Amino acid sequence: MIKKPAKIYLSLIITAVFCMPVLGGNTGAAFLKISPDAQGSGMGGAYTALADGVNAVWWNPGGLASVKGRELTGGHVNWVAGVSYDFMGYAHRIDSGVISAGVSVLDAGALESRDEYGRKGNDFNARDLSVSMAYAKKFANRTGVGLSLKYIKQTIASESAEGVC
């Protein structure tokens, strides 16, 4: 029988292996590099160790342990060329810790297609989606430990790719 610490380490190793990006070439889901909040953006994305409150669902689920009641956050950004980015997160303290969920969407809107001769074709859409669920618990006085699960989907025209990490 495997002891409890060994099960935890084995689970972490398996998770890390399946969530590693493929080496070489371009990576997908680049929209996940977009910071959903002003504080993280202001720090150039170097916010993982400081993340607390509901925004930690994006940065570091362990930071959710600091949530004392319920927290809700949201944001909307209109970029150039009709591209928009939306984020919403919610965290709720329960008896055993904190549960949280977050959704982010990058929508490029309607895009114009062209054939090899430059003639206009049918318009198409491009959209990226990320849905996160997390749980965090506080240990000792200041240590928060969290676990998150993220569903990612990218769609362009009639093609799409999705994954869970």
Image (spheres, rainbow, N blue to C red):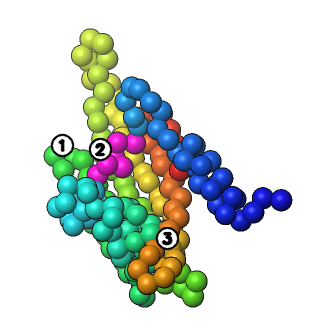
Does dot 1 land on a helix, a strand or a loop?
Answer: helix
Residue at the far right: name it.
1
Q: Given the image, on which type of amino acid does mark 3 rest?
A: Val
Q: Are marks 1 and 3 in contact (CB under 8 Å)?
A: no
What residue is pinned by disc 3? 145
Task: Choose the circle earlier in sequence order: 1 or 3.
Answer: 1
Where does residue 46 sit, x and y in percent of width and height?
26, 57
Q: Residues within 10 Å of mark 1 (few under 14, many from 20)?
A: few
Disc 2 from disc 3: Cα separation: 35 Å
What residue is pinned by disc 1? 81
| Magenta stretch in the rendered image | 29-34
Where does residue 118 sit, x and y in percent of width and height?
24, 16
Does dot 2 land on a helix, a strand or a loop?
Answer: strand
Q: Are marks 1 and 2 in contact (CB under 8 Å)?
A: yes
Task: Choose the circle earlier in sequence order: 2 or 3.
Answer: 2
107 sits to left or right of 20: left
Which label is found at residue 108?
2
* Residue in the foreground of this view, choosing between 146 and 104: 146
Residue 30 shown in magenta: yes
